[in-house]
Image (tube, grey):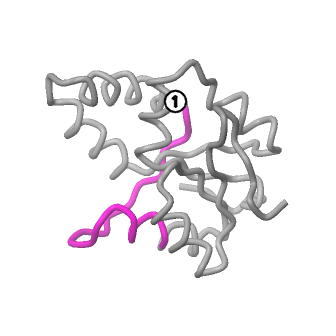
């Protein structure tokens, strides 16, 4: 995986922002591009989490299956870390690559921001940068 290019233009998507984009009329890719990100990535463990949630036959499972199809259009970040939760893995990847994270999870947002990582959140079906 060659991530040596400008990581400030790389953004990692978490599970819930992908599910949100599948459940609402919201174009995640165009919003990321509008915010100046040329590289949009989904970690392999987020794909695994979407598959797991998608195995359910309820509404959330349906949106997770659609989110999985949406996620397949983006760059993949492989991670071999095991034994830690998905939020911790996202935090570690963002620190490692010095990049931003898009999420709809306020607890994850607070955790990332406390580590100095730029976070983009959803507000009114648009991505917002709380730092601006």
- Relative to 73, say whether 75 is above or below: below
- Total label count? 1
- Relative to 98, say whether 60 is above or below: above
Q: Which residue extends farthest bottom?
A: 115
- Residue 39's x, y, as percent? 68, 44
- Residue 60's x, y, as percent? 28, 30
Residue drawn at the location 35% of the way across and 42% of the way down: 47
Residue drawn at the location 50% of the way across and 60% of the way down: 106
Give the side of residue 52 with respect to residue 104, left or right: left
Q: Residue 56 lies in what quarter of the image? A: top left
Q: Residue 64 lies in what quarter of the image? A: top left
- Residue 124's x, y, as percent? 66, 35
- Span of residues in magenta: 74-91
Residue drawn at the location 79% of the way across and 64% of the way down: 131
- Relative to 68, say whether 44 is above or below: below
Residue drawn at the location 80% of the way across and 43% of the way down: 35
Q: Which residue is mark 1?
A: 21
Give the side of residue 43 with respect to residue 118, left or right: left
- Queried whether the magenta region covers residue 82, the answer comes back as yes
Relative depth, front residue between 95 and 16: 16
Q: Quadrant of the C terminus?
A: bottom right
- Relative to 81, say whether 22 is above or below: above
Q: Secondary structure at mark 1?
A: helix
Relative depth, front residue between 59 and 48: 59
Q: Residues within 10 Å of mark 1 (few under 14, many from 20)?
A: many
Give the side of residue 29 with respect to residue 58, left or right: right
- Queried whether the magenta region covers residue 102, the answer comes back as no
Q: Which residue extends farthest front?
A: 124
Give the side of residue 60 with respect to residue 27, left or right: left
- Residue 97's x, y, as percent? 61, 68
């Amino acid at each position: 995986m060659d991530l040596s290019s400008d990581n400030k233009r790389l953004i990692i998507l978490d599970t819930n922002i992908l599910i949100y984009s599948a459940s609402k009329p919201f174009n995640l890719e165009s919003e990321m591009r509008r915010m100046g990100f040329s590289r949009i990535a989904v970690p392999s463990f987020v794909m695994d989490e979407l598959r797991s949630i998608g195995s359910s036959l309820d509404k959330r499972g349906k949106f997770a299956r659609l989110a999985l199809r949406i996620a397949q259009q983006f760059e993949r970040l492989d991670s071999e870390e095991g034994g830690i939760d998905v939020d911790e893995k996202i935090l570690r990847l963002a620190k490692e690559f010095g990049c931003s994270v898009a999420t709809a999870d306020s607890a994850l947002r607070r955790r990332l921001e406390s580590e100095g990582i730029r976070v983009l959140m959803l507000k009114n079906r648009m991505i917002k940068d709380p730092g601006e």
